[in-house]
Amino acid sequence: MKILVINGPNLNMLGIREPDHYGRETYQDLCEKIQKHCDKQNVDVKIYQSNHEGDLVDEIQKAYNNMDGIVINPGAYTHTSIAILDAVKSVNVPTVEVHISKVEEREDFRQVSYVRLACVKTITGHGTDGYLEAIDYLIEAYK
Ligand code: DQA
């Protein structure tokens, strides 16, 4: 099974940015944690991060006919990007939305998620463990 884990803007700043919301693990820590988990589960994982909306769209498009599942944290693009929603809809790959923080308890502008409309599941507020839960869900439901 092949899974794409995709992170949007500012997630490369984990460990530095707003630790009260996002914790103290760095982006590198997150990548290692995901890689280790996938190795254990015998899953082939590609981990990708970009601060640029079009690059995220390009990476989602590459998943077409190539990936069995996507785990996506689009960062702030969650709340603004119809392009990312359309990209996920286009590729027909089961996709789980993950947020490290509990977005539903934060500002009003974080209550909208466009990408959610194309996702089979949403996980919020479980810290970086949410990515592992998303991977396990995809294994369970689609392997
Ligand atoms: C986030 C929540 C978003 O609102 C925010 O813009 C992020 C991170 C999260 O993981 O909790 O960049 O997606």
Image (cartoon, rainbow, N blue to C red):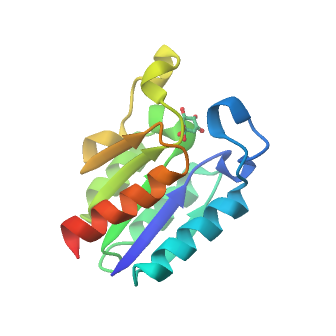
Would residue 42 appear left or right of 50 to someone viewing this image? left
Q: Position of residue 59 (x, y in %)?
A: 49, 66
Relative side of 72 to 128, left or right: left
Counting every numbered tag in the picture gives: 0
- Residue depicted at 48% across the width and 64% down the height: 5
- Residue 80: x and y in percent read 47, 33
- Considering depth in this image, is 72 or 35 the residue closer to the camera? 35
- Seen from the viewer's position, the closer of residues 18 and 49 is 18
Relative height, residue 19 to residue 49 (above, below)? above
Q: Residue at x 61, y 60 (%)?
A: 49
The residue sitting at the top extreme is 108
97 relative to 77, above or below: below
- The image quadrant that residue 127 belongs to is top right
Q: Residue at x 79, y 43 (%)?
A: 16
State the image quarter where residue 134 is shown: bottom left
State the residue at coordinates (59%, 66%): 33
Q: Quadrant of the C terminus?
A: bottom left
Residue 77 in sight here = yes
In the rendered image, the vertical position of residue 52 relative to residue 104, given as above or below: below
Residue 104 placement (x, y as % from top left): 42, 24
The quadrant in which residue 31 appears is: bottom right
